[in-house]
Amino acid sequence: MSDPALQLAAFRADITPPIGHPLCAGWYPSATGVANPLSANGIVLLPEGELPIVLCALDWAELSNGEYDLWRERLAATAGTSPDRVAVHCTHCHDAPWPDRDAQDILDQEGYPNVIMWRPWADAALENVCSALRHATPNAELINGVRAGRAPVHQIASNRRLLGSDGKVKGVRWTRCRDAVLRAEPDGLIDSHLKTISFYKDDRKVAALHYYAVHPTSHDGTGSVTCEFVGLARDRLMAEEGVPHIYFTECAGNITTGKYNDGAGDYRELFSNRIYDAMIQAGKNAVTCPSFPVEWRVAPLLLPLRSDQKKPDLLALIRDPLAISKTRSRAALILAYQRRYEAGRPIPLSALCLGSGIIILHTPGEAFIEYQLFAQKLAPDAIVAVPSYGDCGPGYITLERSFEEGGYEPRDSFCSGDSETLMRRAIESVLHPGQ
């Protein structure tokens, strides 16, 4: 028996912010210029006899809480599907927007408008993407081939957290690391391979999805809006092939370019070339999936709150007239996530399975690389891609032991170390349902 028919349409829309718009939710200087335009890139899959599935990647830093829900709801309504069958992710370029209307509502109530986002522009950006999806769907093409491959990415990714002999974080390799001793340390725990999944009609490529785990930032905090080296590599390949290419950042919560970026120069072009080379090689290494019935699985997540982030303290930070923009923004984002959790509004973790050989696991937050490697061990015979940076309401999703190890990520996370158990259970439930 042949697989049910599958159709696919790709869509793309501009989501570049205007000059003056906050970047990274106000944690970085606002936009003063545009080095590279930002885009939303996605596909809609139309499996025969089932509701459509929408996968979308935004060239933004993050998307969280009510804003994330709104995007899924609007894209679902446009595609004629359920929000549970929509996965929206950010590539996590730092010099880019991070909309969250729940958090901005909190700031508005305290007299601080436009700290995180400009609502009219954010609404227009969403409408641009919905319009692109709406116009693309009638042109969906029949897919009769899926190919998947991997290729190593050379000298980009390294683990950010360097542990000493006492098990504590002894050093951090940020996006740029000027400390030669820290750069000399090994890569650490990473996933060195980029994964590419391509859809075909006969021998013609219709669209390609790419996945790699690294903070996609060569330098930041400049006010110059950019899709960074991953977006540049994607757009270069798209222009050369005349085919839609979509890039997703995998579980890079503790993965940066720090080992290979000493901050002495602009590494954006170099890293872009290396990502581009890996995309090309992954395509050459691709193997045809003999059968690709489509299955979509979802597990709801409610990642528990931290006990040390109290509402009165957060409100005091927001109301402090001497507080800087990042302090107010961060407090409002934490409050927004707390309200989401207390209202019992879950975050979806979902898996798209294409036969037994290809799995795309969609995770929230800035998830640690350990979750990606865990998922891959659960399905060792499949190519498992693990896009992260879905709903970033929880912030960093670390390990339980990370809070004892110390370092930046557990200090900055909005959820507790108890989240690890729930994340692992959810991953198991969608990769091995019924077990």
Image (cartoon, rainbow, N blue to C red):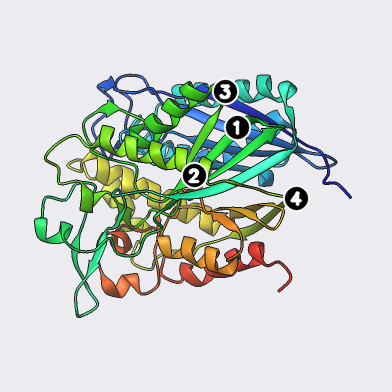
The quarter of the displayed image where residue 403 is located: bottom left
- Residue 336: x and y in percent read 45, 48
* Sequence order check, earlier mark of 2 and 3: 3
Query: Looking at the image, can residue 63 be seen?
Result: no
* Sequence order check, earlier mark of 1 and 4: 1
Separation of marks 1 and 2 at Cα, in angstroms:
14 Å
* Sequence order check, earlier mark of 4 and 3: 3
Image depth: mark 2 or mark 3 in front: 2
Image depth: mark 1 or mark 4 in front: 4
The quarter of the displayed image where residue 236 is located: top left
* Sequence order check, earlier mark of 1 and 2: 1
* Sequence order check, earlier mark of 1 and 3: 3
> Which residue is labeled 1 in the image?
207
Image depth: mark 1 or mark 3 in front: 1
- Residue 306: x and y in percent read 39, 65
- Extreme residue in the bottom direction: 166
Separation of marks 2 and 4 at Cα, in angstroms:
20 Å
Q: Disc 4 residue type?
A: Ser
Pointer 1 local density, CA inside 10 Å: few below 14, some 14–19, many at least 20 = many
The quarter of the displayed image where residue 343 is located: bottom right
> Which residue is labeled 2 in the image?
282
* Sequence order check, earlier mark of 2 and 4: 2
Separation of marks 2 and 3 at Cα, in angstroms:
34 Å
Query: Looking at the image, can residue 246 be seen?
Result: yes
Q: Residue at x 48, y 34 (%)?
A: 58
> Which residue is labeled 3 in the image?
127
Label 2 near label 1: C-beta < 8 Å?
no
Helix, strand or loop for disc 3: helix
